[in-house]
Image (cartoon, grey):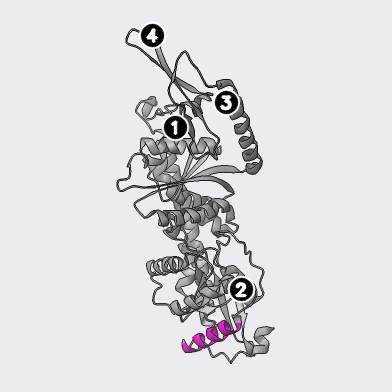
Amino acid sequence: MDMLFLRLDAVIALTVSPVGMPMQWQAAHLLPPDSPAPYRVEPMQPWDQPQSDLTATALALEEELARESSAADKDSGQANRCILVSVSQEPRVVQERNLDELAELARTADLTVCGRMVQRSTAVNPRSLLGRGKMAELEVLALTGRADILVFDGELSPSQLHNLADITERKVLDRTQLILDIFAQHAVTKAGKLQVELAQLKYMLPRLTGKNRAMDRLMGGIGGRGPGETKLEIDRRRSRERMGRLRRELDNLRRQRSYVRSNRARNGIPLAALVGYTNAGKSTLLNTLTRSHVLAQNKLFATLDTTTRRLRFPAEREIVLADTVGFIRNLPQELMEAFQATLEELDSADLLIHVADASHPDLFQQIASVDSILEELDLASVPRLLVLNKWDLVPVAAQAELGDALPDAFHVSAASGQGLKELMQALEMRILTLNKVLLPEASADNINA
């Protein structure tokens, strides 16, 4: 740690006799980042018989470190560099899988991941999550990777965020804040921006702390007497007032959408909502079925606002398809509450089309997460179709296993159109079963067209 912080070429220990005479010396120096160990400790040597050329070692090490630094700078460009950290009681394989998803979130937020650290602990440090040893290891990892941001998997308490930022002197984010930042980047409509701002204020309110004692107390009362309000209390009061205004605006938005839904119900047009894990291909499927041009990207949470499009069947009959915000495991409660105006579109849905990424290694875990969130939203009783998207990316050997494990699922590829004919027919039959509208049979020519 001293060699990293103080940029020392070497650290040398000299042993002396009880009377102060030199006896032996021992040197240690850093190694390049790709070495098996971060440093090397040389054996003890007699003080008057040095056998090491420290100058040559230092020059060689400086040359190697300069080469590594140049390569790192070239790779990083202007992007922010971050270290991913997981501290949990779960098995290491689960933590690694969660860090893979966290890395995708970081990529979506335009962060460059330059390292990760996993600690499985039965007793998590309530102050800073990590002990002194692991904290030192994290600091070494951040220094060698030139990282200025630490991203923790999970949600940190306000005190943990404050303590970690003080100890590391780096920007510290947790998973919830990272997701909120992504939502803020992708919010386009007024409704989306209102909901994201409300979620951010709900998250930040308990985490507002004073940075220093400047303006610690403002004078108040008659003649300037009395303690008045602290700067922190003023910030919190303003945040609460802003949250109240946002809630009123979202209530107006909710009433407008309720009016639109009631008109649609009076016209007898059924609604099918696309739900699923983020980046499962819901927007691509909507575009393919309805010939739309909704934004669809290979990123998490590319779509935030509910988008509705009409899907026409023969004889001028139609249904409405709604593309909703994607779900994710342990969806932050702030987002669940703030996005009620958007998720209410699901309450009036006659059918839920659960779109899952068949090529994802955590397919079953993602399906379970979506089922759990739908249950929290009291939507478990709504009829549902399971659609395994990206079927063309699944290896042939694995297709049979998935078919046996999920026999009622539809195998489609929204990008190539594979399996969409069967999905359309099943969608029509399901709507007929629900007795919402009478739709004639769809012809193959119409579907292909």
Q: Residues within 10 Å of mark 4 (few under 14, many from 20)?
A: few
Answer yes or no: do the residues labelled 2 and 3 have beta carbons within 8 Å? no
- Mark 4 and mark 3: Cα distance apart in space: 27 Å
Of discs 1 and 4, which sits in the foreground? 4
Q: Earlier in the sequence, mark 1 or mark 4?
A: 4
Dot 1: what SS?
A: loop
Residue 340 in the magenta stretch? The answer is: no
Residue where numbered disc 3 is placed: 57
Marks 2 and 4, the one that precedes in the sequence: 4
Badge number at residue 414: 2
Quarter residue 393 falls in = bottom right
Q: Residue at x 58, y 92 (%)?
A: 440
> Which residue is at a point 42% across and 45% down the rendered structure image?
205
Q: Which residues are magenta?
A: 421-433
Quick one: label 4 or label 3, which is nearer the N terminus?
4
Vertical placement of residue 73 versus 255, above or below: above
Q: Are marks 2 and 4 in contact (CB under 8 Å)?
A: no
Residue 28 at x, y = what percent?
47, 26
Residue 21: which disc?
Answer: 4
* Precedes in sequence: disc 2 or disc 3: 3
Which sits in the foreground, 195 or 229? Answer: 195
* In front of the other: 290 or 96: 96
Judge whether residue 292 can be spotted in this image.
yes
- State how far apart marks 2 and 4 are (Cα): 80 Å
Query: What's under tag 4, amino acid-wise?
Result: Met
Give me the C-alpha separation between circle 2 and circle 3: 58 Å
In the rendered image, the vertical position of residue 85 relative to residue 371, given as above or below: above
